[in-house]
Each structure stands twice: as C-alpha cells, then as structure tokens.
C-alpha cells in the first residue's frame, strides 16, 4: 500500500499528495505522514518544491479534519441515542458514556492539537468526538490548524533533511509516536485505577462510620427494652 502511494506521488505529484493526505486526515487507516516524509525527500532531490508542498499538505489535512468534524456534528447525537437503545451494547451504559464525554470535554483542545502531529492515528476519532460534543467550530479550527502546521512541517522537514534515509527517519518518528501513545495510555489507566481505589476506600470509610453511628443507638434500644426474647 505504501509503495502504491509513493508511486502515485512520483507520478502525479501535488495532486496525489493532496488527495492521500485528505483521505488520511478524514480517518482512513492509511499513513499520510509517511507520504509527507517521502515528499520532503523528493523535494530535496529536486523533484518537488518544498515551498509548494507545505500549503498543499496543510490544506488537505485541514479539509479532511473538517469533514469528519462535521460528520460527527451531524450524526453523533443520533448515534449515541441508538447505542443506548441497543441491548447488545449493554456494556456501554449511559453513565459510562457521560463519564467519557465529561473527561473528553475537559481535554478537547489538547487532544485536537496533539493528534494533528504526534498521535496521528487517533486524529479521525478525535474529530468525530469533537463534532459529537458540539465543540465550538472556531476553537476546533484554531487548534486543528495550529497542530496541522506542525503536522506538515515536521515530516516534510525531516524528509528533506534526511533525504537519503527518509524511511529510517519516518520509522523512528513513528516509533516515538507509538511510545508516546503507550505512555499516555498507561498514565490514563493509572489515574483511572487510582480513582477507583479512592472511591472504594471512601465507600468503605462511609460504611464504617455509618456502622459506628448505629452501634450506640442499638445499645440504647437494648438498655431501654431489655434483651430481645429468644423464640422457642
């Protein structure tokens, strides 16, 4: 697949780059960043112009992000309502959905920004969620363009600088992105686990305090009424 895209880039140039980056940004499971590394390397060899590549890549990525944002804005709420009605998705409770949506609302800006250039694999999903949550479009566009500027400059620049070994540079950058995603996932899971432990401790403490409060009352009742009769 990657060989096909690189061949298309060599044959059709900027048009192929725009279309492939657009489709990747819209959420298709293909690597637009790898193609940008290749495009940067080709520009170093004189086949493409690095000055033209930047606006081409940036416009394609922003347009693809906007497409999935507006899809989420259009169909997101009906989709959630449908999920809540489906019995086969009982593990997706309304409480779990609401907790997830609340967590996402607090970090939407950061999520949009980071998934433009660092955690690119989650970009399409974040666009859909931002649209679903009716995240203000002006804010979305600001963070999207800000992140995509880096998302274009970094691979194009590295591809241009390491033109002779652009594939190795792309591999290292991909490995770093994967490591960062794993590290971030581990942090989130740790925080969730700690929150669950704290909630259980609070529940046990509250239960113990309630029992301590009931014991004097039970003792007083026994003193006033005497020991309870033992049935025959």
Image (cartoon, rainbow, N blue to C red):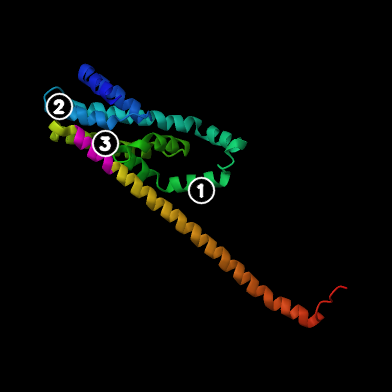
Q: Residues within 10 Å of mark 1 (few under 14, many from 20)?
A: few
| Disc 3 target residue | 151
Query: In the picture shown, does residue 199 fall above or below 97?
Result: below
| Disc 2 target residue | 43
Q: Which residues are magenta?
A: 167-176
Residue 96 seen in the current view? yes
The residue lying at 20 percent from left, 28 percent from top is 38
The residue lying at 62 percent from left, 37 percent from top is 87
Of marks 1 and 3, which one's residue comes earlier in the chain?
Answer: 1
Of residue 116 and residue 193, the one placed in the foreground of this image is 193
Identity of the residue furthest to the right in this view? 232
Q: Quadrant of the C terminus?
A: bottom right
Identity of the residue furthest to the front in this view? 232
Residue 177 found in image quarter = top left
Residue 16, percent across and down? 26, 20
Residue 85 found in image quarter = top right
Q: Residues within 10 Å of mark 3 (few under 14, many from 20)?
A: many
The residue lying at 30 percent from left, 22 percent from top is 19
Query: In the picture shown, does residue 187 fall above or below 68?
Result: below
- The answer to whether the residue labelled 3 contacts the one labelled 2, judged by CB atoms less than 8 Å apart, is no
Q: Is residue 41 left or right of residue 139?
A: left
Query: Main SS type for the magenta part?
Result: helix
- The answer to whether the residue labelled 1 contacts the one labelled 3, judged by CB atoms less than 8 Å apart, is no
Of residue 74 and residue 184, the one placed in the foreground of this image is 184
The residues bearing labels 1 and 2 have C-alpha atoms spaced at a distance of 47 Å
Secondary element type, mark 3: helix
Residue 153 seen in the current view? no
Secondary element type, mark 2: helix
Residue 56, percent across and down? 24, 26
| Disc 1 target residue | 99
Of marks 1 and 2, which one's residue comes earlier in the chain?
Answer: 2
The residues bearing labels 3 and 2 have C-alpha atoms spaced at a distance of 17 Å
């Amino acid at each position: 697949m990657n060989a096909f895209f690189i061949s298309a880039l060599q044959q059709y140039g900027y048009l192929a780059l725009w279309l492939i980056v657009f489709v990747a940004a819209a959420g298709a499971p293909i690597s637009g960043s790898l193609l940008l590394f290749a495009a940067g390397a080709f520009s170093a060899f004189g086949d493409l112009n690095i000055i033209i590549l930047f606006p081409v890549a940036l416009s394609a990525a922003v347009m693809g992000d906007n497409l999935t944002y507006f899809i989420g804005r259009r169909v997101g709420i009906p989709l959630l309502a449908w999920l809540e009605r489906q019995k086969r998705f009982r593990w997706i409770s309304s409480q779990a959905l609401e907790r997830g949506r609340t967590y996402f609302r607090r970090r939407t800006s950061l999520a949009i920004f980071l998934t433009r250039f660092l955690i690119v694999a989650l970009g399409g999903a974040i666009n859909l969620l931002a649209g679903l949550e009716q995240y203000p479009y002006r804010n979305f566009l600001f963070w999207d363009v800000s992140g995509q500027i880096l998302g274009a400059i970094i691979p194009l620049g590295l591809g241009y600088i390491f033109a002779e070994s652009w594939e190795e540079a792309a591999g290292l950058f991909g490995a770093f992105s994967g490591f960062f995603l794993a590290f971030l996932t581990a942090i989130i899971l740790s925080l969730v686990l700690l929150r669950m432990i704290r909630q259980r401790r609070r529940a046990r403490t509250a239960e113990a305090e309630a029992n301590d409060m009931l014991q004097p009352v039970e003792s007083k009742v026994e003193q006033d009424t005497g020991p309870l009769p033992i049935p025959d």
